[in-house]
Image (tube, grey):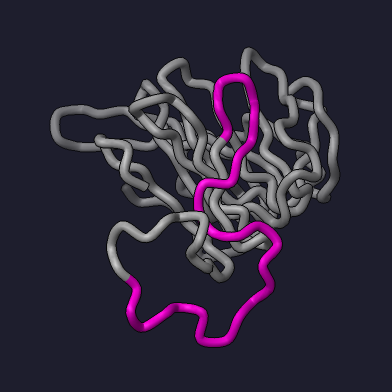
Amino acid sequence: VRLSGCFKGYHDTEDGFNALFNKPCGLAVDSDDNLIIADTGNNCLRKIELTRVGGEINIMRVFTIAGSKITEPGYKDGGVGECLFNNPTDVAIDEEDIIYVADAGNDCIRRIKEGKVTTIGEKTFNNPQGIAINPIDKTLIVTDTGNNCVKRIDEDCMIKVIAGKEGQGVVENALPKDIKWGEIPLDITLQQPMGVIVDGEGVI
């Protein structure tokens, strides 16, 4: 797919070639095979609408799906046209096309459902960078980067540390040389974990 990205800025477009982004980070694919982008520097979510003709993929348009078009950082829940983000870094999409956003600058996870943006875990996280969905139990897996741990969010929005020690400061040479498989996840030390992905068997 050919898409402009050589110049930093903010611009939606009907052809894709003139679209402008500002430090786009995470992306995910929705049920229609469109790309959802965390446009970090523009503090919003963008969609790249694609069509497939034979073996060729064409860009139909690029447009903003959530976040203010003024591109300034902020925090506000509500409709997708009025909500505000602060450095969103990653996105995940479930089977119902509900979008989850790692809103790093606001230290929380945001959910976009039926045109509304709501917050999960306000001030529970510290600079969360990565987010993924476990296909086995549909929980959210989040790298809580500033807290040096990985957390799980269940369907009741309960949040639990599953790896690392929350709040553990950065430790020099933290990785032990004799680390072994089977070590208890809560006993290990993580240092600023960033991206995350979960495979088809639920392995993180």
The front one of 72 and 138 is 138
Residue 16 forms part of the magenta stretch: no
The span picked out in magenta is 153-179
**Residue 10: percent from the left, percent from the top?**
67, 50
Q: Is residue 89 above or below residue 7?
A: above
Residue pictured at 67% horizontal, 60% vertical: 147
Q: Is residue 111 above or below residue 202?
A: above
**Residue most extreme to the bottom:** 172
Q: Is residue 68 above or below residue 154?
A: below
Overall secondary structure of the magenta section: loop
Residue pictured at 68% horizontal, 42% vertical: 44
Residue pictured at 81% horizontal, 28% vertical: 77
**Residue 4: percent from the left, percent from the top?**
47, 55
**Residue 105: percent from the left, percent from the top?**
75, 53
Mark yes or no: residue 19 visible: no
Residue pictured at 78% horizontal, 48% vertical: 106
The front one of 48 and 17 is 48
Mark yes or no: residue 74 visible: yes
The front one of 153 and 4 is 153
Q: Is residue 57 above or below residue 9?
A: above
Q: Quadrant of residue 7?
A: bottom right
